[in-house]
Amino acid sequence: QCPPGGDDGIHKLADLLGVEYKPLNAEHGEPKPKSVAIIDESTCIGCTLCIQACPVDAIVGAAKQMHTIIEKECTGCELCLPPCPVDCIDMQVIPETTENWKWKYPIYKIEQQN
């Protein structure tokens, strides 16, 4: 029920887990464009609360030192935003390009010939 994956992600997870698809519950948020967290490093106080909140370890830093995001690891879940006491984390939409666009490959049934 995670908005960053959107409806397509929920379908894929249901198929993978062999369970029935359930639409995204609005209580968990609304699907948004793919985005990544960005830390204003000049404002960051190094409290480590965002590091503790990140479920994919996409934030690096040490206590009382500036933190930064590993953008390729960030899922855009926004779980790092609420714990930040100085509001130095923003979400930045990732523009769709030919390098990051998820290409949909056609699926063909392959039949074995005898």
Image (tube, rainbow, N blue to C red):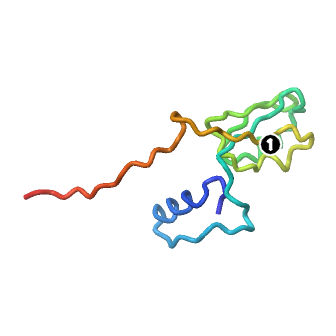
Q: In the rendering, at what x and y percent does residue 59 appear? A: 72, 37
- Quarter of the figure with residue 36: top right
Q: Position of residue 86 (x, y in %)?
A: 92, 40
User: Hey, which quadrant is residue 29 in on the image?
Assistant: bottom right
Q: Amino acid at mark 1?
A: Cys
Q: Is residue 69 above or below residue 20?
A: above
Q: Position of residue 25 (x, y in %)?
A: 68, 69
Q: Residue at x 51, y 65 (%)?
A: 14
Specify the farthest residue to the left: 114
**Along the line of sight, which residue is nearer the eye, 45 or 108?**
108
Element marked by disc 1: helix
Which residue is disc 1 drawn over? Answer: 50
- Compared across the picture, whether 3 is left or right of 99 comes to right
Name of the residue lying farthest toward the right: 86
Residue displayed at 67% across by 33% down: 70
Q: For this view, does 19 lie left or right of residue 77?
A: left
Q: Is residue 6 left or right of residue 109?
A: right
Quadrant of the rendering where the N terminus is positioned? bottom right
Nearer to the camera, 69 or 60? 69
Please rate how many residues cluster around mark 1, counting C-alpha atoms within 10 Å: few if below 14, some from 14 to 19, many from 20. Answer: many
How many dots with numbers? 1
Residue at the spot 89% in from the left edge and 41% down from the top edge: 87
Front residue of 56/87: it is 87
Give me the residue at 90% from left, 32% from top.
45
Compared to 48, does 106 lie above or below?
Answer: below
Image quadrant in which the C terminus is located: bottom left
Name the spot of residue 40 as percent of width and height, x first: 83, 31
